[in-house]
Image (cartoon, rainbow, N blue to C red):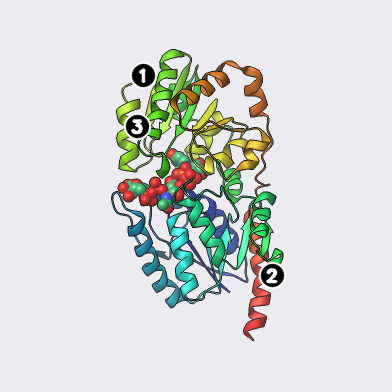
Amino acid sequence: MKVVIVFGTRPEAIKMCPVIKAIKRCEGLECCVCVTGQHKDMLQQVLDVFHVKADYNLDIMREKQTLYDITYAVMEGIRNVIRKERPGIVLVHGDTTTTFAAALSCFYEKIPIGHVEAGLRTRNKYSPYPEEFNRQAVDIVSDLYFAPTNSAKDNLLKEGKKEELVFVTGNTAIDALKTTVREDYNHEILNWAAGSRMILLTAHRRENWGTSLENIFEAVRTIVDEQQDIKVVCPVHKNPIIQETAHRILGNHKRIKLVSPLNVIDFHNIIAKAYLILTDSGGIQEEAPSLGKPVLVLRDMTERPEGVAAGSLKLVGTDKEQIKRNLKNILRDSKEYLRMSSAQNPYGDGHASEKIVKILMEWRERYTKNEK
Ligand code: UD1
Ligand code: UDP
């Protein structure tokens, strides 16, 4: 059976490369990789690290692209690819606009869809925006659901999905993490941060653009000014809006380092050596608990409640005073720090991709039987 895998952004790539590798190891499945190029350089960084070559690259990225731009371009490009390839199934991942538009094209072409990382929910369509809509919409048209956790599965069952189509696999982020982190890793950023408590900061969410993003960066700068023993490393997303705000507020400080997006090996190893993470990212909320790192989540709600329940994530929102208060607390409360760092990883054992392949093989049996 031919499996077309579609993705377009950095996080999708990090979580789908392990799936691609597992499919390529499996005799009964043929793998065709189609990247939309919603991200350009940030996507290529991941493909290079995992040595994955795309069979198709729709190359859609434009400077400051809108949701309309992405949706039109992906839908048209994917339609052409699937009309040519006629796959047995298309796999999409998570909640980006690539994911949504690709799934909609497959639905229009009546091609089965497998949704990897299905079932995450905040139930607020504007938070995160547009991701909450994207993942709910993809789940309406999917045929197979690879839920990372039991609570994601429960969300799908509550929406009426048939239990025999929903599988708990763990999150493929953990599969990727198992291949990147090593003990003897070093990097110039670590030399720069040596002797201080290193905070790793990332922010990029659309709903945080504007005041919330300014609040985040201003709060961080204030705390760095107050506390001499901390240094902040911030790999700045390529989005020009994020670049401008980060450089304006966090630039020119000797204990704040703004760097270009790091390749995933560097990034994972730097998480492993960080003292604390501040982020509005989805994927980092899954990775940090595995590496025993506390995360202050710069959002009002999360679709990853397992990390909060396990104790490694704390939602702190985007209010400046609240971020400052929470950051000061965790920096001075060593008991709380220890509690957050010793939480268990709730996102699986690093074998999610193999489980997905096994399920695809079983599904193929049924699919080819129906075809005969
Ligand atoms: C996208 C996803 C978001 C995901 C994030 C991961 C949507 C709507 N958003 O958001 O769910 O969390 O990726 O990072 O699907 N750019 C570059 N080079 C790159 C990548 C981006 O220059 O390699 C710039 C471009 O100007 C581009 C802009 O960033 O127009 C925004 O990219 P876009 O994919 O629209 O949104 P993200 O904020 O990256
Ligand atoms: N990441 C990376 N380099 C960076 C920042 C993040 O490789 O400089 C990785 C990170 O480890 C995680 C993913 O990118 O796997 C998260 O991507 P992002 O925060 O852009 O998107 P989200 O997960 O919020 O959709």
Q: Evaluate if marks 2 and 3 touch, with contact meaning CB atoms under 8 Å apart.
A: no
Q: Residues within 10 Å of mark 3 (few under 14, many from 20)?
A: many
Q: Is mark 3 on a helix, strand or loop?
A: helix
The x, y position of residue 91, in whole percent, is 54, 64
Which of marks 3 and 1 precedes in the sequence? Answer: 3
> Relative to 166, is 274 above or below?
above
Residue 74 visible, this orientation: yes
Separation (CA) of disc 2 from disc 1? 56 Å
Q: Is mark 2 on a helix, strand or loop?
A: helix
Residue 50 visible, this orientation: no
The x, y position of residue 87, in whole percent, is 52, 74
Q: Is 254 on the left or on the right of 342, as rendered? A: left
Q: Residues within 10 Å of mark 2 (few under 14, many from 20)?
A: few
Give the residue at x 41% y 72%: 79
Give the residue at x 66% y 71%: 363
Q: What element carries label 1?
A: loop
The N terminus lies in which quarter of the figure? bottom right
Residue that numbered label 3 is attached to: 246
Separation (CA) of disc 2 from disc 3? 48 Å
The C terminus lies in which quarter of the figure? bottom right
The x, y position of residue 192, in whole percent, is 43, 22
Give the residue at x 62% y 69%: 27
Which amino acid does the dot numbered 2 rest on? Glu
Which amino acid does the dot numbered 1 rest on? Lys
Residue that numbered label 1 is attached to: 254
> Relative to 121, is 187 above or below?
above
> Relative to 202, is 168 above or below?
below
The disc label shown at residue 362, or none: 2
